[in-house]
Image (cartoon, grey):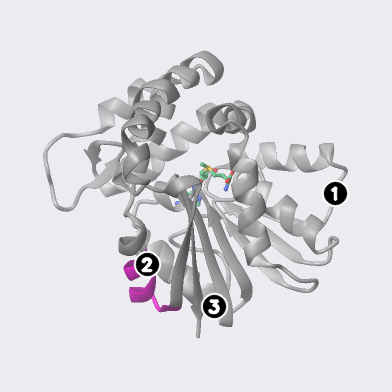
Amino acid sequence: MPQAKRKTRSGTDPEAAWFGFRHVRPEDKAGLVREVFTSVAGRYDLMNDLMSGGLHRLWKDRLVAIMHPKAGDIILDVAGGTGDVALRCLKRTDHKAKITVCDINPAMLKEGRAKMMDHGILSGIEWVTGNAEELPLPSRSVDIYSIAFGLRNVTHIDKALSEAARVLKPGGRFYCLEFSPGVRHELKPLYDRYCLSVLPWIGEFVAKDRDAYRYLAESIQKFPDQPALAKRMEKAGLTQVKWLNLTGGVAVIHEGWRV
Ligand SMILES: C[S@@+](CC[C@H](N)C(=O)[O-])C[C@H]1O[C@@H](n2cnc3c(N)ncnc32)[C@H](O)[C@@H]1O
């Protein structure tokens, strides 16, 4: 991603956003993130399996079990990428929920649509290109909002959380599955080493993009830990916020309600 590097700037500008470990201008971050996912879209699912040893499937299963979608629910999966969460929601509701997958990157959505066709699914999911910070949906229109491994990538997390609260109906539920920097103390040295050394190496050999997977590793370290994210959810208007650590806190599900 040589272009990405050219656009970044160093220093500790308080107005800057994080792109991995680097400060970038907030207006540049979405474009840089888009480049990352455009570059890896075709190998995204394979990389997920390789990087997590298949664990991401269990984490997503757990997420959807906790979401407990029912027939007739209107579900919005933001940063939905290739549709893993949407697929699980469809199966769990026997294809009777209405699901919108919203993602800023058309290349990821294209992969998702193709994957659904491979599963013989031709309807039940609407694919929408859109930004988590400015959702193209009316207020109070959604029963369940989910975002899996997406919040870390948005430029303004608080804006995305406010948008989630806006689109949820009163009584609607918010779920975020995300990697966390707050892994258990005894796992931390091994985990950090894996993220910062092994992940970029797998990225180079499989997705042919070392920088994209270095970004992934760095962005995890910069993401708020469990209590910090919970506070920000409450500030955005979500209540009864709680979280569940998965695999020693490597991944976390945060949950909240819109009153
Ligand atoms: C790591 S992938 C997660 C995809 C999927 N949710 C999953 O769990 O497999 C992150 C996704 O977030 C999307 N994304 C990044 N910034 C976004 C934004 N501001 N609004 C919506 N989607 C965004 C990317 O295009 C990418 O598809």
Q: Residues within 10 Å of mark 1 (few under 14, many from 20)?
A: few
Q: SS of the residue at dot 3? A: loop
Is residue 146 one of those drawn in magenta? no
Residue visible at 58% across and 78% down? 172
Nearer the camera: disc 2 or disc 1: 2
- First in sequence: mark 3 or mark 1? 1
| Label 3: how many Cα within 10 Å (few below 14, some 14–19, many 20+) | some
Q: Position of residue 120 (x, y in %)?
A: 88, 43
The kind of secondary structure element at disc 2 is helix
Q: Which residue lies furthest to the right in this view?
A: 120
Residue 85 as seen in the image, left or right of residue 3: right
Instruction: Report the residue marked by disc 3.
Output: 139
Question: In the rendered image of this protein, does residue 140 appear above or below residue 65?
Answer: below
Numbered disc 1: secondary structure: loop
Disc 2 residue crowd, few under 14, some 14–19, many 20+, Cα 10 Å: many
Q: Earlier in the sequence, mark 3 or mark 2?
A: 3
Question: Where is mark 2, residue-wise?
Answer: 230
Would the CB of label 3 be found within 8 Å of ligand 1? no
Badge number at residue 93: none
Q: Where is residue 44 in the image (x, y as percent from the top left)?
A: 59, 31
The answer to which quarter of the image holds residue 52 is top right
Q: In which quarter of the image is residue 62?
A: bottom right
Residue in front for this viewpoint, 253 or 4: 253
Q: Name the residue under label 1.
A: 122
Q: What residue span does the magenta drawing correspond to?
A: 230-239
